Amino acid sequence: MSAKMRVDHLRGSVYATVLIISVTLGVAAVALSTFGTARSRYSDVAVAERRTKSLLEGATQMAAVALVNFIASLNTGDDLDPGNSWDPNITIDGTYIPCAVKRAPVDEETEINPTTGLLEIRTQFEISARLISPEGTPTAVTTLVNIYSVPLFQFGVFYDGDLEIVPGPAMTISGRVHTNSDLYVGTNDTKGGGLSFETDYLRAAGQMFRRRKDNDKDFTGKTQVQDLAGIYQTWPNSDYDSDASDWYQKALETWGGTVKSDVHGVVPLELPPIGAIEPGGYYNTEASVGGVVINDGRIFVGGVDVTEKAPPGVVSSINTWDAREGATVQLWSVDMSLLKTFIDANLGSTFNGLLYMTQPTTADQPDGFQLTKGAELPAGGLTVVTNTPLYIKGDYNKTDKKPAAVIADAVNLLSNAWNNTKKSGSGLPNAADTTYNAAFVAGIVPTPDGGGPYSGGLENFFRYHEDWADKDGTDGGRKTMFGEGSCVNLYKSQYADGEWKYGGNRYTAPNRIWSYDTDFNDLAGQPPYAPQGVSAGVVLAGLESN
């Protein structure tokens, strides 16, 4: 038996792993191209052995990518349980290569990534690929891979697609900020403090642009980011983008490592698919086992319809005018205080903290759900998931704050003053100060590549429907949205796909006193079933055996 060991700490995403595979397959291609010229120096057997080895190494790398995708996709089977083996069905150049992926005999560990400071859950896997050589000799290559699961609510802001942050008035953002794609950042505020990033982590796996995506215009206001010492440093120039020739060094000199883009080695994380929130998906499945499911107004626990056992009024039907969607939408309104009473009395400590809700909905008629009276949530925390648009009316998780998350097609925030009197053609109802404490995962309507209707940016991640600004001066001034949490975008809104526009009969903006919830930096502070990004790192590659 011969062995070749190579330690390769590739602390990157699945896409980085894909690059590794490309290199590996390139090696295989070189081996194949060498075939014709090697005859004069090597025997046919030696060349065939080289080809076999290259195929096996390529197969283990491809299996590593498949493993990352499998885990990120929230598969609930037992394929990866300790003691089990999984074959990802790898084929290269028409050759099927049997692979076995299984948990390594190493305990799962939680650790802090020394480069990013992120909390990661590390699980080690053993990937083996085996072929019979042309001479009939069995040959195998084994690779050890670490899979890193990163709870996404450790980020104040996380976007899978392009992230646009271009507020009108002054805005301060706290917590880590990451996009798997490009970042567009700046403000035209010249009277206030401009745009400030109170963080030591501002990253883009793509490029960073100090201009708008929708119309390519530059900004006139100040943008500043804290360096690693916590001192604000102004972004060098209003048109200083990451495609500048000296960007790599300039960014490091200015912020000391706070601001990084793709040229600094920032890579994407592999993320859960949107199918996870659809009926029959991961969250529906998990809620059906130990949580609560509300399906078209009916309440289910463990697959059993318990609607008649629940307190009267837990779920009721209402109609609401949504000016952004230009439609009167039918909502199942869920009284969270009554639901909490029902959960406490009937599930108690067996409740897994997951509420899943669904009903028939379309982009033409984006019906959904409304949460009311949610100031206090069940003990242990709560994650609410729906594949439909969601409206939250009034204070949420304000009393005795618990770990909480909301995952929806779109998140609409209604204030304590909302009384559902808004109609098509009516004026804007006045808002009131309201608190929302939760991590939010929501869809957006992205700005098209090459320009077009603005997505609304991070500043309009939440959708509003009231006069928060007191535009007519009759309600005592601008009202405030308070809260702590995290804003995560993983997908495009499938149903609530109306374009963002400001003013008119849609909304006016609140004063936002919203910050990152530092409780999410601890696993104990994470909401139930919090989504995770997944990356891989090769620990040991090229271990050959017969």
Image (tube, rainbow, N blue to C red):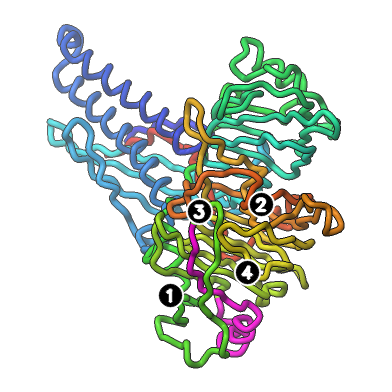
| Mark 3 vs mark 4, CA separation in Å | 16 Å
Q: Magenta segment range?
A: 327-351
* Residues marked 2 and 1 touching at CB (< 8 Å): no
Q: What residue did someone put label 2 on? A: 507
- Secondary structure at badge 3 equals loop
Give yes or no for contact between labels 1 and 3 (Cβ–Cβ under 8 Å). Answer: no
Q: Residue 31 sits in which quadrant?
A: top left
In the image, residue 454 lies in the stretch drawn in magenta: no
- Which class describes the residues within 10 Å of circle 1: few (<14), some (14-19), or many (20+)? some
What secondary structure is found at the residue carrying circle 2? loop
Q: CA distance from mark 2 to mark 1?
A: 30 Å
**Label 1: which residue?**
295
Point 59% across, 54% down: residue: 109
Which residue carries the number 4 mark? 420
Q: Which residue is mark 3?
A: 325
Q: Earlier in the sequence, mark 1 or mark 4?
A: 1
Three-letter amino acid code of the residue under disc 3: Glu
